[in-house]
Image: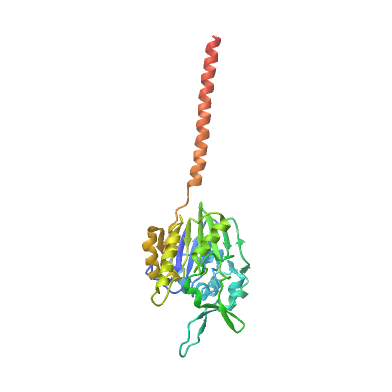
């Protein structure tokens, strides 16, 4: 399995552009897929630099309806018009950021997807949890167990002439089951990484081996004390899982450093162009081999015992 970041906020591989946004290329035995496509066609240029043939991609998963994850979709379709694009139907909503009252600038800034995306023939609209095939599935949050990260309060949805709090019903999470691993991929985790993990456990009955996700904790100003404690407590909760975490993008480096101090090697940061190395689980193969060896030993001993009995009965007859 190959997992390569195609674009992210911070500089990684020197030849690669970096920008506010996110995209991952993932290659399994059955699929070559993209999770998000970053903010622009820079994502495609990075893929070329990294030697990734986007014409061979067969699926795109859009994590949620924001421009910094979808800006590269239209340019991608000019290169590849056969890959299916899976998104929640609600990802076509009108989503905005409340930037506050500022002189010479609109308070509400559109951050949704290009409206032309909804008209693409390769788009597959989903409504809730969906199994794509034996390797891929997506799920959504049914109910929040804890509140969303504090940074989401300024993100809105426009309904007619009103701006209401975005409930992130358009956000979905990809689960990959391949090579003996369960990998959970989220874009920004707007609904909160702790809520996502609880939902995963409820729907899949276990914990993921690997999580790749932004945590949406980035802030342009210093953290207030309660915000800092929220970051610390999130890290403490994540540390309870047996999962390996890779984060990026909207987590922000200051929040990452706080979490890294708590989580240690359990948490890593992925920069633009970085590759995530995940070793295949060979446990299943070992189990099969061990089972074969047990039967092999059984038949070997059975043969020896039969031989000894034959020798013994033959001796008695004499």
Visible residue check, residue 25: yes
Viewer-nearest residue: 94 or 70: 94
Q: Is residue 236 left or right of residue 121?
A: left
Q: Nearer the viewer, residue 167 or 280?
A: 167
Query: Residue furthest toward the bottom?
Result: 104
Q: Position of residue 102 (x, y in %)?
A: 46, 87
Q: Quadrant of residue 165?
A: bottom right
* Colouring: rainbow
Q: How many marks?
A: 0
Left/right placement of residue 15 relative to residue 44 reads left
Image quadrant where one finds the C terminus: top right
Horizontal side of 122 relative to 227 (left or right) equals right
Can you give x and y, in whole percent of width and height, for residue 147 in the image?
Answer: 51, 69
Most foreground residue, 190 or 9: 190
Residue pictured at 51% horizontal, 28% vertical:
300
Please tell me which residue is depicted at 53% across the width and 19% down the height of the picture.
309
Q: Residue furthest front?
A: 226
The answer to which image quadrant residue 248 occupies is bottom left
Residue 88 vertical placement versus 310 (above, below): below
Q: Position of residue 297 (x, y in %)?
A: 50, 31
Judged from this view, the residue extending furthest toward the top is 318
Q: Is residue 272 visible?
A: no
Question: In the displayed structure, would residue 56 be above or below residue 309?
Answer: below
Residue at image x 59%, y 77%?
116
């Amino acid at each position: 399995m190959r997992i390569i970041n195609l674009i992210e906020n911070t500089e990684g591989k020197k030849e690669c552009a970096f920008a506010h946004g996110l995209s991952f290329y993932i290659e399994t035995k059955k699929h070559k897929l993209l999770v998000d496509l970053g903010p622009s066609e820079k994502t495609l240029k990075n893929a070329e630099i990294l030697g990734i043939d986007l014409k061979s991609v067969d699926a795109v998963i859009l994590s949620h309806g924001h421009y910094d994850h979808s800006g590269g979709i239209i340019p991608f379709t000019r290169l590849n018009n056969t890959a299916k694009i899976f998104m929640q139907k609600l990802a076509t909503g009108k989503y905005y950021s409340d930037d506050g009252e500022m002189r010479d600038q609109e308070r509400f800034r559109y951050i949704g997807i290009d409206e032309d995306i909804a008209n693409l023939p390769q788009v597959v609209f989903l409504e809730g949890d969906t199994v794509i095939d034996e390797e891929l599935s997506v799920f959504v949050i049914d109910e929040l167990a804890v509140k969303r990260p504090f940074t989401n309060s300024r993100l809105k949805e426009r309904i007619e002439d009103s701006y209401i709090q975005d409930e992130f019903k358009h956000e979905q999470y990809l689960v990959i089951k391949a090579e003996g691993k369960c990998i959970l991929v989220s874009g920004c985790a707007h609904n909160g990484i702790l809520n996502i993990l609880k939902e995963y456990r409820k729907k899949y009955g276990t914990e993921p081996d690997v999580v790749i996700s932004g945590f949406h904790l980035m802030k342009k100003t210093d953290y207030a004390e309660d915000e800092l404690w929220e970051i610390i407590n999130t890290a403490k909760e994540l540390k309870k899982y047996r999962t390996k975490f890779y984060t990026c993008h909207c987590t922000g480096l200051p929040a990452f450093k706080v979490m890294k101090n708590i989580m240690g090697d359990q948490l890593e940061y992925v920069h633009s162009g970085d590759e995530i190395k995940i070793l295949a689980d060979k446990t299943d193969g070992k189990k099969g081999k061990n089972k074969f060896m047990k039967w092999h030993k059984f038949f070997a001993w059975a043969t020896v015992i039969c031989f000894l009995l034959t020798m013994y009965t033959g001796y008695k007859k004499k």
